[in-house]
Image (cartoon, rainbow, N blue to C red):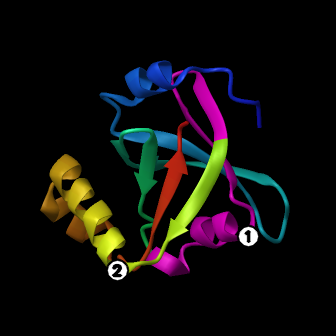
Amino acid sequence: MPEDTVTNAAVRDALADAREIELTHTGRRSGRQISHPVWFVQQDDSVFLMPITGSDSDWYKNVRRTPRVEIARDGMAVSTSATPITDADRVRRVEEMFRAKYGADQVDAQYPKRDVAVQVALA
């Protein structure tokens, strides 16, 4: 994963109107880089993610094992660290941000298990 050479302001601007970003993480068994699109919300200098199948999600398990990730959108990429969130109140706050951005019906339909979230630092 390339090192971050993008300013925080440039990252915030690139993410401002995005509905999804590309998340790249390291496979816990294979050690390979795995990329896929994910929904996200942004607050201050952090991006928050919710795994679709919660703590059962492979990418969540991978991030717990190797917290170094890359997020990318439109040619902008940032290599940074991801921190799992397991506290129920914090997970609920992330879920509420997702509901505000994507709609409660979409969150209910797309995220059947909402027991964890992930914070990705932009700073």
Q: Within the magenta stretch, is there residue 76?
A: yes
Q: Amino acid at mark 1?
A: Arg
Give the secondary structure at mark 2. Answer: helix
Could you tell me if the residues under marks 1 and 2 are in contact, i.e. CB atoms within 8 Å?
Answer: no
Q: Which residue: 53% across, 81% down?
A: 56
Task: Decide: few, some or many residues near mark 2? Use Cα within 10 Å; few <14, some 14-19, many ≥20.
Answer: few
Residue toward you, 119 or 39: 119
In the rendered image, which residue does mark 2 sit on?
88
Q: Which residue: 40% across, 30% down?
A: 15
Q: Within the magenta stretch, is there residue 71?
A: yes
Q: Amino acid at mark 2?
A: Ala
Mark seen at residue 65: 1
Q: Which residue: 19% across, 58% down?
A: 99
Q: CA distance from mark 1 to mark 2?
A: 21 Å
The magenta segment is: 54-79
- For residue 66, side relative to residue 115 (left or right): right
- The spot of residue 123 in percent (x, y) is 55, 36
Nearer mark to the viewer, of 1 and 2: 2
Residue toward you, 87 or 111: 87
Question: In the image, is residue 54 above or below residue 27?
Answer: below
